[in-house]
């Protein structure tokens, strides 16, 4: 992960000191592990104790530039069983992921290693 940016309801963008990785496997699963570097980070929809971790089968729609993961296991148990749809953009070795609903207000960028 090279960056996480949050946009608040007023349109103000903030970079969050976050680190992590996303793995798309050849067998059709996705795994996310990430962490907010701030020890006082508040829980969010996707995090507990500043950490985010989930995985499950993923369906990729290249024509729409979206993917959907069905969460099988997650640090945040409320996510288990949910389908999370994301928009993606690939440019060279960079992957940008955003939520389908722009009101969620985040953007994460990864660099292929």
Image: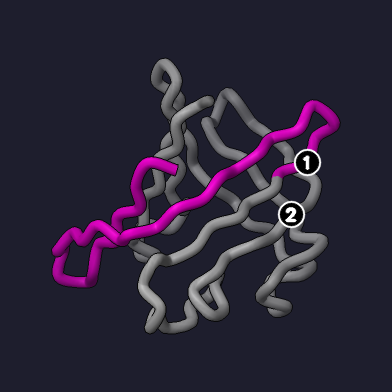
**Marks 1/2: CA distance?**
7 Å
First in residue order: circle 1 vs circle 2: 1
Decide if residue 53 is on the left or right side of residue 11.
Answer: right
Residue holding disc 2: 55
**Residue at disc 2, secondary structure:** strand
Quick one: 51 or 72, which is closer to the camera?
Answer: 51
* Quadrant of the rendered image containing residue 70: bottom right
* Quadrant of the rendered image containing residue 27: top right
Residue holding disc 1: 29
Query: Magenta part of the protein: which range?
Result: 1-30
Residue 51 is one of the magenta-drawn residues: no
Quick one: 73 or 87, which is closer to the camera?
Answer: 73
Quick one: 64 or 35, which is closer to the camera?
Answer: 35
State the residue at coordinates (36%, 73%).
Answer: 38
The rendered magenta stretch, by its main secondary structure, is classed as strand
**Residue at disc 1, secondary structure:** strand
Image coordinates of residue 65 in percent, x first then y, are 52, 31
């Amino acid at each position: 992960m090279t960056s996480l940016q949050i946009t608040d309801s007023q349109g103000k963008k903030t970079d969050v000191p976050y680190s992590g990785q996303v793995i798309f496997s050849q067998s059709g699963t996705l795994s996310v592990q990430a962490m907010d570097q701030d020890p006082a980070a508040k829980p969010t929809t996707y995090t507990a104790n500043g950490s985010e971790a989930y995985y499950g089968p993923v369906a990729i729609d290249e024509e729409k530039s979206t993917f959907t993961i069905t969460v099988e296991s997650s640090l945040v148990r409320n996510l288990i069983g949910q389908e999370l749809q994301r928009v993606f953009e690939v440019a060279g070795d960079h992957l940008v992921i955003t939520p389908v609903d722009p009101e969620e207000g985040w953007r994460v960028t990864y660099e292929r290693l």
